[in-house]
Image (cartoon, rainbow, N blue to C red):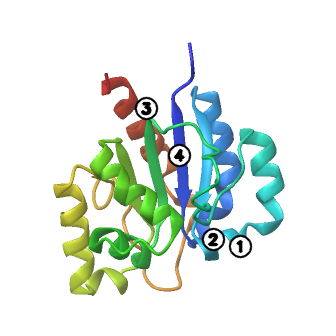
Amino acid sequence: MNRPVLYLFGSAAPPVQQFADVARSAQTAGFDVCVGLTPTAARWLDSEVPLLEELTGHPVRSEYKQPTEPDVWPPANVIVFAPVTFNSLNAWALGLTHHFVVGVVAEGIGKGIPTVAMPCVNTAYVQHPQFDQSVATLRGAGVSVLYGPGGFEPNEPGEGRPEGYPWQLAMAEATRAVRLTP
């Protein structure tokens, strides 16, 4: 039996630096993992890309492929976009797909791919009126947004706690989603 394919996507917030451990954990849980990053997150993890590719057996992607190039990843059974920043969350909700990972998750809604999003934002960002609208838009489109009680809860600006990012919640939701998908 083939393992379910997890697209593990991240944007540039401190917890993305834990991607190697998250990928290992997802593999232990039975997933075939493909890693996608926003361009800034890809720069942050530049020195870890070879490790991530060796761990997963797939190229790490942060850019759209050329139209004539074959797709190098198997189709996703579930997508986890975590950490998803204020910018990426809003772009996704508004359908602004200038970054590869945002384009994939936007299209994933239409394809019916179960998708889990867990923001990583501070309390100043969540005061912006677009944030709540974006969360509501994505939830209304069927995305499981793990934000608020039972999900990610924002910290004060400058008081980030990447070691306390609740990865286990995103992975449990991804596992649940795959089990419910026919």
- For the residues bearing labels 4 and 1, Cβ distance under 8 angstroms: no
As measured in the structure, the alpha-carbon distance from the residue carrying label 2 to the one carrying label 3 is 25 Å
- The amino acid type found where label 2 is placed reads Ala
Residue where numbered disc 4 is placed = 7
Q: Nearer the viewer, residue 182 or 65?
A: 65
As measured in the structure, the alpha-carbon distance from the residue carrying label 4 to the one carrying label 3 is 12 Å
As measured in the structure, the alpha-carbon distance from the residue carrying label 2 to the one carrying label 4 is 15 Å
Residue where numbered disc 1 is placed = 44
- For the residues bearing labels 2 and 4, Cβ distance under 8 angstroms: no
Measured from the top left, where is residue 91 in percent x and y?
36, 75
- Residue at (29% x, 42% y) in the render: 112
Asked which secondary structure carries label 2, the reply is helix
As measured in the structure, the alpha-carbon distance from the residue carrying label 4 to the one carrying label 1 is 19 Å
Measured from the top left, where is residue 150 in percent x and y?
31, 51
- The amino acid type found where label 1 is placed reads Trp
Q: Earlier in the sequence, mark 2 or mark 4?
A: 4
The local crowd at label 4, few if under 14, some if 14 to 19, many if 20 or more residues have their Cα within 10 Å, is many
- The amino acid type found where label 3 is placed reads Thr
Q: Earlier in the sequence, mark 4 or mark 1?
A: 4
- Which mark, residue 41? 2
- Which mark, residue 128? none
Q: Nearer the viewer, residue 113 or 87?
A: 113
> The N terminus is located in which quarter?
top right
Q: Quadrant of residue 130?
A: bottom left
Q: Nearer the viewer, residue 112 or 67?
A: 67
- Which mark, residue 175? 3
> The C terminus is located in which quarter?
top left
Q: Earlier in the sequence, mark 1 or mark 3?
A: 1
